[in-house]
Image (cartoon, rainbow, N blue to C red):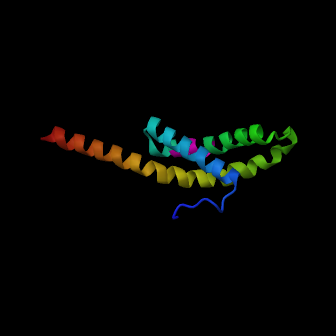
Amino acid sequence: AVFSFTHMDSEDKAFIAIALLVAVCAHVFIRRFVIACLVIVVASPALYAVESFIRLKLPPAKIFWLPSVFLEGGLYAFGIALVTGLPFYLFRWWRRHNAKRNTDA
């Protein structure tokens, strides 16, 4: 199995699922590649933090792990945003390029 996720715990799988969902939605609805990536970098760790607080029923005193969630999660989310957004960017570039070529003729 090339894509085996057996080495990951459930929290890593949850973050990757949230980041992929946010990345696809952001790149579909936001046309600017860089702005979509920035939205993903901020929204993915935030949604993961909310999901963790709800799922694990953490007390408010456990808020001190949030900076590490945003730092580490933001780095992972940025990589996911780049890889996920590249096909969207290339497709939009191809469509724009072909539209310019067709109007020149």
Place of residue 105 in the rendered image (x, y in percent of width and height, measured from the top left): 12, 41
| Residue 63 on the magenta segment | no
Residue 48 locus on image (x, y percent): 68, 43
The residue most toward the front is 1
**Residue 86 appears left or right of 76:** left
**Can residue 39 be found in the magenta stretch?**
yes
Residue reaching furthest bottom? Answer: 2
Question: Which residue is pictured at 48% across the width and 50% down the height?
Answer: 84
Residue, far left: 105
Residue drawn at x 75%, y 37% is 54
Closest to the observer: 18 or 44? Answer: 18
How many numbered discs sit on the rendered protein?
0
Residue 55, how many percent across, how many down? 75, 40
Tell me the residue at 66%/39% (across/down). Answer: 47
Q: Which is the main secondary structure of the residues drawn in magenta? A: helix
What x and y, as percent, mark residue 17?
Answer: 59, 47
Which residue is depicted at the point 34% across and 46% down? Answer: 91
> Which residues, given as a range, are shown in magenta?
37-42
Tell me which corner region of the image, top left, top right, bottom left or bottom right, holds residue 100: top left
Q: Is residue 35 left or right of residue 8?
A: left
Vertical relation: 11 (above or below) 31 = below
Against 98, residue 7 (above or below) is below
Q: Nearest the camera: 96 or 58?
A: 58
